């Protein structure tokens, strides 16, 4: 089979997945709406009569909040965190940094829409599991978390080789599964060893960074050094401008400090 045919099959497969995901989202939304309407009719004691009138395009009822996706939640501009359904995040292939719009309808339903995709980069990784059974992806000597919905949807197992998406300009915590490249590319033990090596390398890097910070004194302004006697005041240069400017600044500070004291004395008198 030629490369072109493979590309066509891959493209058609991705398109079919997207279409199915959209169908699932529409069906879930319709079921939620119909269920809420039935409950409302029961509470009001009315019988269902006729098809409800469709809302006009552009109508938007409910509370709208915008925010940033962090891999599991949307952090809104109001400072609150809103849960993003794992199935939606997985099927929509949301990455950290994506901008979302959340509409909270009067019946309490959450409807998300991606309004500002973050720049993405592609990578290839290996599926692993830690000691607690959590699924992870090791790529570029980094360990990333993945949503359980992705594990279920792609039927992942330790040792599978996968194509992933990551935010281009962020140090991500979560990876997004784009596709499975090879099932069982490594045995689980090999995958676990790769994960441990990545963790060890990152730990060593952090320890090295901490050691490099030890012994470094925090930066301090020249005026602070002068105040504690560690540095001489600026010397007068040939034109005398530097020293004159420094003296004027100090005189202004003294005046600002002395003025409140003088006012206190006047009030006391």
Image (spheres, rainbow, N blue to C red):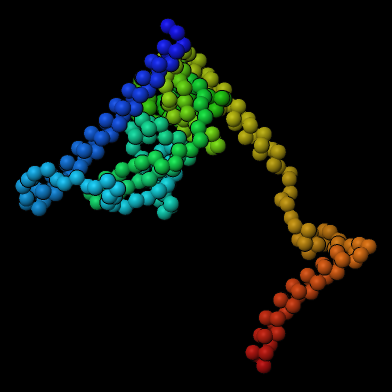
Quadrant including the C terminus:
bottom right
Query: Is residue 247 placed above or below 88 in the rendered structure?
Result: below
Residue 182 lies in quadrant: top left
Q: Residue at x 59, y 30 (%)?
A: 202
Residue 101 position, x and y percent, is 38, 45
Residue 68 lies in quadrant: top left
Nearest the eye: 113 or 260: 113
Lateral position of residue 92 relative to residue 236, left or right: left
Q: Residue at x 7, y 45 (%)?
A: 49
Residue 28 position, x and y percent, is 24, 35
In the image, farthest residue toward the right: 238
Residue 226 position, x and y percent, is 81, 62
Lateral position of residue 19 relative to residue 176, left or right: left
Query: Is residue 248 placed above or below 127 in the rendered structure?
Result: below
Nearest the eye: 215 or 253: 253
Lateral position of residue 101 relative to residue 28, left or right: right
Quadrant including the N terminus:
top left
Nearest the eye: 53 or 145: 53
Nearest the eye: 267 or 26: 26
Q: Residue at x 66, y 39 (%)?
A: 210
Q: Residue at x 76, y 61 (%)?
A: 224
Instruction: Decide if residue 234 is in sight here.
Output: yes
Residue 100 position, x and y percent, is 40, 43
In the image, farthest residue toward the front: 57
In the image, farthest residue toward the bottom: 269
Instruction: Decide if residue 184 is in sight here.
Output: no
Lateral position of residue 206 relative to residue 94, left or right: right
């Amino acid at each position: 089979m030629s490369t072109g045919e493979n590309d066509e099959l891959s493209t058609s497969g991705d398109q079919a997945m997207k279409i199915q995901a959209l169908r699932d989202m529409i069906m879930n939304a319709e079921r939620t709406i119909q269920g809420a309407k039935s409950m409302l009719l029961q509470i009001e004691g009315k019988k269902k009569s006729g098809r409800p009138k469709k809302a006009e395009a552009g109508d938007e009822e409910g509370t709208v909040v915008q925010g940033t996706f962090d891999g599991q939640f949307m952090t809104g501009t109001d400072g609150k965190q809103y849960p993003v359904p794992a199935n939606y995040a997985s099927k929509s292939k949301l990455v950290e940094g994506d901008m979302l719009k959340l509409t909270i309808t009067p019946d309490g339903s959450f409807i998300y829409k991606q309004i500002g995709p973050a720049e993405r980069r592609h990578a290839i990784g290996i599926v692993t599991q830690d000691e607690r059974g959590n699924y992870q992806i090791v790529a570029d000597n980094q360990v990333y978390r993945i949503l359980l919905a992705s594990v279920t949807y792609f039927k992942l197992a330790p040792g599978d080789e996968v194509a992933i998406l990551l935010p281009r300009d962020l140090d991500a915590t979560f990876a997004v599964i784009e596709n499975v490249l090879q099932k069982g590319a490594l045995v689980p033990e090999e995958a676990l060893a790769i994960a441990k090596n990545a963790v060890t390398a990152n730990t060593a890097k952090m320890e090295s960074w901490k050691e490099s910070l030890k012994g470094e004194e925090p930066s301090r302004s020249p005026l602070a050094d002068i105040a504690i006697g560690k540095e001489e005041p600026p010397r007068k240069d040939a034109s005398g401008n530097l020293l004159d400017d420094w003296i004027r600044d100090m005189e202004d500070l003294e005046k600002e400090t002395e003025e409140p004291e003088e006012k206190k004395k006047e009030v006391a008198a």
